[in-house]
């Protein structure tokens, strides 16, 4: 009887670990756009992650995980991805921060591309991208 229970528990554990591994691998295939700001007196950072499945999640300095705040159709993500690519986020090297800083990050599989800037000194087109993202994607989240 103990052998049967041991076998059943072992089989269940193997199935569980396999499912976890598949979800980790599928996360590597994802694309996402992360937009945020940080710094200031408290030094906290607020990020909004827009995934290819249309989910918008928020993470602040106090949070350890993102929490879902909105859902958009996946086609909307493709429009924003095209805009980020039009701004040449993959080619631009601009990692400047100040007391208060803003950033746009694009992830494609396991590669990250990020542009960050201090207040009022954004690279061409990125301030409009940031403001549009906050207005249309995040809204009242």
Image (spheres, helix red, strand yellow):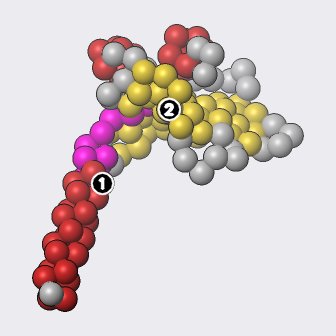
Q: Nearer the viewer, residue 35 or 1?
A: 1
Up/down of 14 relative to 32, above or below: below
- The answer to whether residue 42 shows anywhere in this view is yes
Between discs 2 and 1, the one toward the N terminus: 1
Measured Cα–Cα span from mark 2 to mark 1: 19 Å
Disc 2 designates what residue?
Answer: 68
Residue numbers of the magenta segment = 25-34
What residue is at 25 percent from the left and 66 percent from the top? Answer: 17
Query: In the image, residue 56 lies at what x, y percent?
Result: 47, 27
Up/down of 119 relative to 137, above or below: below
What residue is at 70 percent from the left and 47 percent from the top? Answer: 62
Q: Nearer the viewer, residue 2 or 122?
A: 2
Looking at the rendered structure, the secondary structure element under dot 2 is strand
Q: Looking at the rendering, in which quadrant would you find the N terminus? A: bottom left
Disc 1 designates what residue?
Answer: 24
What residue is at 53 percent from the left and 27 percent from the top? Answer: 69
Badge 2: few (under 14), some or many (20 or more) residues near its Cα, within 10 Å?
Answer: some
Residue 112's image quarter?
top left
Looking at the rendered structure, the secondary structure element under dot 1 is helix
Up/down of 43 relative to 78, above or below: below
Q: Residue furthest bottom?
A: 2
Up/down of 36 relative to 43, above or below: above
Query: In the image, residue 119 lies at what x, y percent?
Result: 73, 26
Q: Is residue 27 left or right of residue 136?
A: left
Whether residue 32 is in magenta: the answer is yes
Q: Are marks 2 and 1 in contact (CB under 8 Å)?
A: no
Badge 1: few (under 14), some or many (20 or more) residues near its Cα, within 10 Å?
Answer: few
């Amino acid at each position: 009887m103990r052998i049967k229970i041991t076998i059943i528990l072992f089989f269940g554990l193997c199935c569980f670990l396999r499912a976890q591994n598949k979800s980790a691998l599928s996360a590597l295939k994802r694309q996402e756009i992360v937009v945020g700001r940080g710094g200031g007196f408290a030094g906290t950072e607020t990020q909004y992650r827009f995934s290819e499945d249309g989910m918008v999640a928020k993470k602040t300095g106090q949070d350890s995980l993102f929490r879902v705040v909105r859902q958009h159709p996946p086609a909307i993500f493709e429009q924003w991805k095209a805009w980020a690519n039009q701004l040449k986020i993959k080619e631009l090297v601009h990692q400047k921060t100040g007391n208060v800083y803003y950033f746009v990050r694009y992830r494609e599989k396991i590669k990250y591309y990020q542009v960050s800037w201090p207040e009022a000194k954004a690279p061409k087109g990125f301030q409009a991208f940031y403001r549009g993202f906050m207005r249309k994607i995040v809204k009242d989240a």
